[in-house]
């Protein structure tokens, strides 16, 4: 399993008036961590991947988080992101945010690999995740 570790400074714009991270901002941060994980595993930016695999992205269809301790303006945090499970066209992404070495937030987001619907280009349709993407993110050798 490939794990992307990202160091991140909490900025004022992430915070509510009390100076703690406004909870939806965690999902914004987690989204950028997922793009970094894909880039680390595949060697392609999200834009390059979308062109190479003719897909439209991987929207979130379910998200949840457990908040154990707040992060505040100016905190330097570390986020670990990995794929927890693959299915045919969807996958679960686990995010763990540490603040001062302590687990502060844990998130799990289910995403779906989508491409334009061949019957209606205005719509998106779940499609199979390419095996080489699964192999790259699982830390396995690429299929021959």
Image: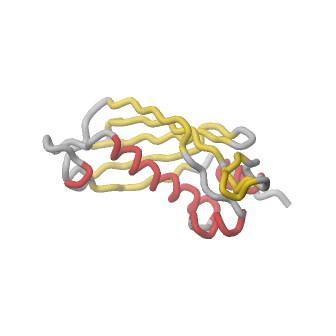
Q: Is residue 78 above or below residue 144?
A: above
Figure coloring: secondary structure
Q: Residue 140 appears at what percent x and percent y?
A: 72, 51
Position of 41 with respect to 106 (left or right) is right
Snapshot quadrant of residue 65: top left
Q: Is residue 45 above or below residue 116?
A: below
Q: Residue 49 appears at what percent x and percent y?
A: 64, 65
Position of 23 with respect to 139 (left or right) is left
Q: Residue 133 appears at what percent x and percent y?
A: 70, 55
Q: Quadrant of the C terminus?
A: bottom right
**Which residue is rendered at x = 54% and y = 55% of the image?**
37
Snapshot quadrant of residue 11: bottom left
**Which residue is rendered at x = 20% and y = 42% of the image?**
20
**Which residue is rendered at x = 23% and y = 50% of the image?**
75
Snapshot quadrant of residue 87: top right
**Which residue is rendered at x = 62% and y = 46% of the image?**
1
Q: Nearer the viewer, residue 87 or 75?
A: 87
Q: Nearer the viewer, residue 100 or 36?
A: 36
Q: Nearer the viewer, residue 70 or 16?
A: 16
Position of 47 with respect to 103 (left or right) is right
């Amino acid at each position: 399993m490939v794990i992307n570790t990202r160091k991140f400074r909490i900025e004022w714009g992430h915070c509510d008036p009390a100076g703690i991270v406004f909870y939806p901002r965690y999902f914004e941060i987690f989204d950028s961590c997922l793009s970094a994980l894909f880039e680390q595993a595949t060697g392609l930016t999200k834009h390059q991947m979308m062109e190479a695999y003719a897909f439209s992205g991987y929207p979130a269809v379910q998200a949840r988080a457990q908040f154990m301790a707040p992060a505040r303006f100016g905190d330097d945090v570390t986020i670990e992101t990995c794929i927890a499970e693959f299915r045919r066209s969807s996958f679960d992404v686990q995010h763990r945010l540490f603040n001062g070495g302590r687990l502060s937030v844990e998130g799990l987001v289910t995403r779906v690999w989508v491409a334009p619907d061949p019957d209606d280009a205005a719509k998106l349709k779940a499609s199979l995740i390419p095996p080489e993407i699964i192999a790259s993110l699982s830390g396995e050798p690429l299929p021959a």
